[in-house]
Image (cartoon, coloured by chain):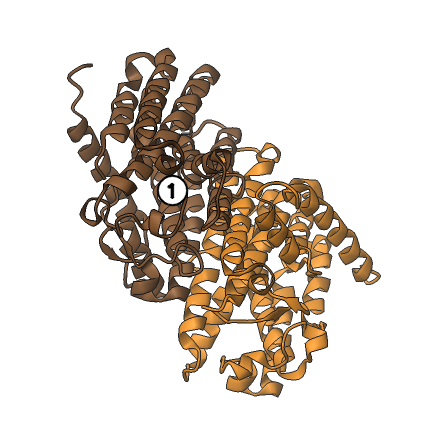
Chain colours: A brown, B orange
Amino acid sequence: MSGFDLPAYLADRRAAVDRALEAALPGEDVPPATVHQAMRYSLFAGGKRLRPILVIAGAEAVGGSLRQVLPTACALECIHTYSLIHDDLPAMDDDDFRRGRPTSHKAFGEAIAILAGDGLLTLAFRLIADNADTVPDPRALRDVVAEIADAAGTLGMVGGQVVDIESEGKQISAETLEYIHTHKTAALLRAALVSGARRGGATPAQLAAVRAAGGHLGLAFQIVDDILDVDGSLVELGKTAGSDQRKQKATYPEHHGLAASRVKAKTLIEDSKAALAPLGPGAEPIRVLADFVLERRS
Amino acid sequence: MSGFDLPAYLADRRAAVDRALEAALPGEDVPPATVHQAMRYSLFAGGKRLRPILVIAGAEAVGGSLRQVLPTACALECIHTYSLIHDDLPAMDDDDFRRGRPTSHKAFGEAIAILAGDGLLTLAFRLIADNADTVPDPRALRDVVAEIADAAGTLGMVGGQVVDIESEGKQISAETLEYIHTHKTAALLRAALVSGARRGGATPAQLAAVRAAGGHLGLAFQIVDDILDVDGSLVELGKTAGSDQRKQKATYPEHHGLAASRVKAKTLIEDSKAALAPLGPGAEPIRVLADFVLERRS
């Protein structure tokens, strides 16, 4: 599958996700309108839809279909978006810009931003349940809800944000930095891939392969993010350049140097692709996505 | 069943819920400890456990068991508690006290309070999925998740809070006040009763009866809350007396007068009990709970 057309693959899946999100979100005029406007403002802000695409790629890798997992794919984007809205709040990272536009609380005020996040998180679980018809038994639905809730909750993403917030301005160990990265970012990326595979009908061996691949890929993604934060610009990242450094947030390059960080990211992506070996050619989109995570410039 | 012993019923169910919540929540020393301490601080603050008890009573009314619905009962309390934590935030109602103790953000800071709420909401859906083994097919689990997510989201509780926040200090219509009350409070109380009945194996006719009863009971609960806010004291309510009035929040008595509010609450409770007629004697605990909602002093 050396001829795999990644741009076409991404554009196609992204369009499907955008259409499904458009249909899943209450319209901007549905009361109470403000919160629905705020949810849409952040959800349709030009995101890459990486998490939904990982859900889809996870399903396709084990013979599942896009249709089977589209609501779950949308749910992952809702959870990601809620986390960005809450992370940007004044009490948290206090960011004024995100993807080149004012953050939610800057555009809608803090109360609506908090509630838009709450609304997106709640909608996410509604969406996960939505395609129960495509799963054979209640344990499959339970396992996907549990997978995603664990990845998003205090033992996953929320927990990572707690430690991130509590580490600001402090000297932290490499272990703490890895805790933040694996929990705040990698956990949800891994859950995306695993949920897709689970919904797609993965065998236990396939699930284990995808879980390992997702963990490596997720950590690599965050290290590349840190590298881009040092290297990047406002235009490329859509947020204030070097904002992590300005806020004295620990980054991978700060702890390990820029060159070692690049090597680490590359190694993780290789590990991720190696873990996918048992899945054969069906996992080619995930492999190409893994390379994309490494080589992205934003 | 005139001899129904409500205090014993409440004490027994509340103890079961507390034990289950204790087991469901990560310990105070589980990293990241702060957020788990904050979640427990608010969750174990002497709440009446009304929502969990409604879940249980809903199940028992249709022949279901406590065991079947205990995780769902706990989930409802997690959602209720998250909503209190976020509602109390400075950007929202800016309350310093809740149940006689400092609010979450006063005790743990705003960032941890926001994240504790996020963590509780996420855990709630984990818990709902948890007892999938006790439901016969995936649609039953989907229906309960959908019921609760709809009641908790922007078309329910979050939506009610949006309109409540946006109405502060404004002259609002009786219709807007009713919107706030039915969405912010009644929706989740109704969902508690309906989810319990659904998990307990209710027939469509039983579900319809419980849904109607839950709607009336939920609105009555909020009207009584408003009456207590005018009548009550800090000791009874555990929050600053008359705080809704001080914040220029519209209340039912303000719109309709205290006497008419009492009549309205009483009528709603009678309607609620009338709606339960098709369920026969199994619904006696719900009927007694309905009277309790009307007669409570806190």
Left or right, residue A61 beside residue B29:
left
Q: Where is residue A178 in the image (x, y as percent from the top left)?
A: 46, 34
Q: How crowded is mark 1: few (under 14 residues within 10 Å), some or many (20 or more)?
A: many
Q: Which of A289 and A216 is in front in this view?
A: A216
Q: Say what secondary structure mark 1 lies in.
A: helix
Judge by depth and name the residue closer to the eye, A33 or B196.
A33
> Does B83 sit above or below residue B18?
below
Q: Say above or below: B196 vs B294.
A: above
> Label 1 sits on what residue type?
Ala
The quarter of the picture where residue B123 lies is top right
Q: The C terminus of chain B lies in which quarter of the figure?
A: bottom right
Q: Which of A195 and B276 is in front in this view?
A: A195
| Residue at image coords 38%, 35% | A252
Instruction: Decide if residue B4 is in sight here.
Output: no
The residue that label 1 is drawn on is: A75
Height in image: B106 above or below B229? Answer: above
Chain ID at mark 1:
A
> Residue A227: horizontal and vertical position, in percent?
30, 36
